[in-house]
Amino acid sequence: MQEPQPDTRQETDTRQETTGAYSAVGCLARRMSLARYEGQNLTLGAAHQMNTNASLLTLAFVFDLASWGVLFNLVLTKGFEVRPVSGVALLAGMVLASAVLLVEREIVTFDSDGSRPWFAFIMMLRMSLIAFFAYLTSMSLDGAVLSVVVGDQVSVESKQAEIARRNQELRNRYVGQRRDEQLLTDLRDNAGQDLAASRTANAAVKGKLPRAQLEHDDAKQRLAATNNQLEDATLSQTKAEETYRRAKARLSHATTENRAERERAARKARFQLSESRAELAL
């Protein structure tokens, strides 16, 4: 009896289909080692599912890196500022994101169908942690993050700090009140000294007032005498000017008479000379 021959054509088709499905696996999925066993028993749908899982894992890694980096930076710097310690926060976020990526990679590469609940569980755990820290960041740092880390110790320290702050405010208020009282006392003393000096000056002015009045009257009398002397001098000057004018008129009249007398004498002398010449001629 002849033995049945194995269907080599079917095995060849299966091998070709497996090879084609393995070639459909993307570079990202291969780098993450999602395509195990080098594509053995791998269908085309499973290859596309691996590419989708690789993309989702990449997005999850980037999201984890950003989220954990920001949260660690928030814890270390107590704010959203970028400082040198932010590099440590980024490194810690990268380590945690890489660890989560490795766990998720192992989950999605399981051959059993039980990997989906584990994948959903770790995704829900991640989202729950991120939501929890987001809720903490929406509150004040002193009342939320620090209270979660150190518990009641932070509450006690915050109360002590509040009491110290209030005591400092009361002390500053008391010092300010004492300073204001001292300033008011100094102002009162200065006002009293100014009032006493003003009264002394008024008394001195009142004491000097009669003497000043006498000096003023004496000055008035001297001014009146000076005015009288000035009037007398003016009258004397007027008289002197009148006398000068009269003397000048007399001098002018005398000069005129003297000139006429000289002319008469000259005419008389010429007449006598002419007579003498006439006599000599005879």
Image: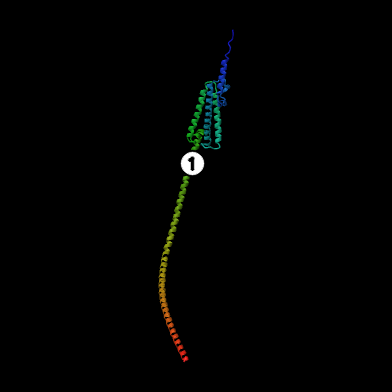
* Label 1: few (<14), some (14–19) or many (≥20) C-alpha neighbours in 10 Å: few
Mark 1 = which residue? 165
Residue 27 percent location from the top left of the image: 56, 26
Q: Nearer the viewer, residue 170 or 212?
A: 212
Residue at (46, 51) in percent of width and height: 183
In terms of image quadrants, where is residue 261?
bottom left
What element does badge 1 sit on? helix
Judging depth in this view, the residue of 218 and 280 nearest the camera is 280
**Which amino acid type is marked by label 1?**
Arg
Q: Residue at x 44, y 60 (%)?
A: 201
Q: Is residue 158 visible?
A: yes
The one of 251 and 137 positioned closer to us in this rendering: 251
| Residue that extends furthest to the top in the rendered view of this protein | 1
Residue 232 vs residue 197, the one in the foreground? 232
Q: Could you say which quadrant of the image residue 191 lies in?
A: bottom left
User: Residue 42: horizontal and vertical position, in percent?
Assistant: 55, 20
- Report x, y in % for residue 112: 53, 20
In this rendering, the answer to whether 161 lies above or below 236 is above
Image point (44%, 56%), residue name = 194
Q: Position of residue 80 (x, y in %)?
A: 51, 36
How many numbered discs, if any?
Answer: 1
Residue 41 shows in this picture: no
